[in-house]
Each structure stands twice: as structure tokens, then as C-alpha cells.
Image (cartoon, helix red, strand yellow):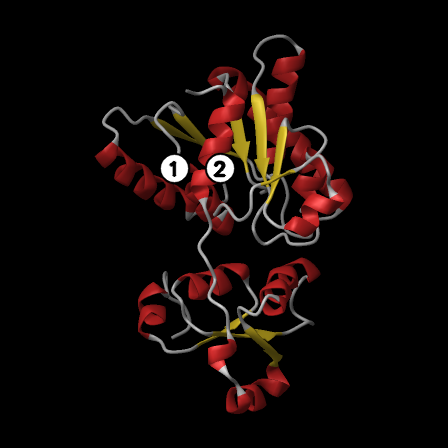
Amino acid sequence: FRFKDSLAEDMGRADLVISHAGAGSCLEALEKGKPLVVVINEKLMNNHQLELAKRLHRDGHVLCCNCSTLVETLQSMDLSALKPFPPGQPEKFAVFLDEVSGVQ
Amino acid sequence: TGGHTTEILRLLSCLSESYSPRHYVFADSDKMSEAKIRSFEQKRSETFSNSQFTLDRIPRSREVRQSWTSSMVTTLYSILYSLPLTYKLKPDLVLCNGPGTCVPVCVSALLLGLLGIKRAIIVYVESICRVETLSLSGKILYYFSDYFIVQWPDLKEKYPKSVYLGRIV
């Protein structure tokens, strides 16, 4: 398919996700606890969009490659080495906001 | 827009009903945010009975990669549009997370404060996508917001006046 409103269902059933470096896609896969291989196309993406993918890779949460090294990466990957990605904590934001806005 | 809306709704997810009524302001060209917001508020009203919110659209400040000179014109137009809206809403707190749309609203809120009409607290949360560099909105609002929150430690180092709470979305 070319386009769906949500990939949540497909991702839920997947054992492995291979994605471009878009933040939404990466985070969605990681939050579902799926092993993720991020394919980076430097020519297509803004520098800033790569920041997150590079950081996730550096922190050991995803595997990275580019289009030409994808096959090789899939053949030699060790998914068990990937670190789980803990969820964000909006509760901390709520506590902070209560403090600064004087809410009891 | 898209990612920003998803993030801001997550930020709101743990807030108490003290933060009510909520006024959502987004770009007129944004087709998807309204549905996401309504869905969020619908769920919220199941827990909090008197939940109130409104939706307002303003002209989009700037398209991706739009040139400097034309961006200034479109942003100015957005500011002229958002001034009466902000005056009408007179918010106590402005919470934003980075789309160009937030700049005119914050500028309007600042103006209202300077004119002694209504002083709002301006809280800016930079997107989780921003690990090493700030967005354009962030670079502007770093100097004009009351609280500037970043989600990665590298940014806290580069922008010492920012607040780092870890990942919050």
C-alpha cells in the first residue's frame, strides 16, 4: 500500500520494522518495543531530521544503515544488542507546570 | 501540524483540570490536528466532567523552507490575525512546542503583557526531535519565553537558560 492513516496495527504485528529516519516513525516503532532498522537517505532529509535517528543509534536503540547497505545490515544484524527505549514521562512536565504556574 | 500536535497532546495528558478551558490554536492549512484534538478531549471528558476547550485557526506563519523575506510577511500577517484572538482569549498560560504557528501567538501574548492588558506565562517545549539544534521557533522563543524546556541534555548544555526534565512526551 502507498498510504494508510495509521500503521499502528501493522507495527503491532511486526517482528522487525525497517523505516526511514522520520521521527514519528522511529518513535512509534520504539514505543511498541519493536526492533528498528533506520534507513538514512542523507540526500533527501534535512540535517535536523537526522539528529534523532543518529542519537537513537548512538544510544543503542536502533540499527542504522543507508539504502546500499540495507541488505548487508539485515543479514548480519544482532537485534538482541538493541537497548529498550523507555517511554517519556509527561508526569514530570505536569509537576513542573504546576510549580511554575502556582497550581496547587 | 501532525507531529507537533501529537507531542503537545502527550504533554497535556497528565495535567489536572486546573488547566481549563484549553484553547487550541493551529494553522488553517492543518487538516489532521482537529481530529486528534477532539479525540483527546473526548477521552478527557470521560474522566473530567466539566472539561472545556475551544479550537481556533490562524493563517500559517511559514511553509517549510520558505524564504526569509516572504516568511517575515506571512508571519506578520499571522500576528495581525492572532492579536485579536489572543486579546479575546486573554490566556493565563501559553503552552507551545515549536510549529511556526506558535510564534505569532506568543508575540501577541507578549504584546498584551507589555501593554498591561494581560500577562501570560509563556512555556515553550522544544520537540523531542531536536537533539542538538533548536528549531527556528525555538531560537526565537528561547529569548522571549518564561520557561524553555528541552528534552535532550546536549541542548541543555548549549542553552543554559533552558529547563531539562528528560523526555516528557
Secondary structure at numbered mark 1: loop
**For residue B30, above or below residue B53:** below
CA separation in Å, label 1 and label 2? 8 Å
Chain containing mark 1? B
The percent position of residue A98, horizontal first and vertical second, equals: 47, 26
Chain containing mark 2? A
Q: Nearer the viewer, residue A73 or B66?
A: A73
- Name the residue rendered at 26%, 29% in the picture: B48
- Name the residue rendered at 50%, 25% in the picture: A99
The residue where tag 1 is placed is B14
The residue where tag 2 is placed is A93
**For residue B60, above or below residue B64:** above
Q: Which mark is residue A71?
A: none
Quadrant of res A58: bottom right
Quadrant of res A21: bottom right
**For residue A62, above or below residue B113:** below
Marks 1 and 2 close (CB-CB < 8 Å): yes
Q: Is residue B134 something one can see in this rendering?
A: no
Given the image, on which type of amino acid does mark 2 rest?
Phe
Q: Is residue B83 something one can see in this rendering?
A: yes
Check the picture and name the quadrant holding the C terminus of chain A. top left
In this view, the residue farthest toward the top is B116
Check the picture and name the quadrant holding the N terminus of chain A. bottom left
The percent position of residue B86, horizontal first and vertical second, equals: 53, 21
Q: Nearer the viewer, residue A48 or B107?
A: A48
The tally of labels here is 2
Q: Residues within 10 Å of mark 2 (few under 14, many from 20)?
A: many
Given the image, on which type of amino acid does mark 1 rest?
Cys
- Name the residue rendered at 50%, 16% in the picture: B90
User: Is B74 left or right of B6, judged from the image as shown?
Assistant: right
Secondary structure at numbered mark 2: helix
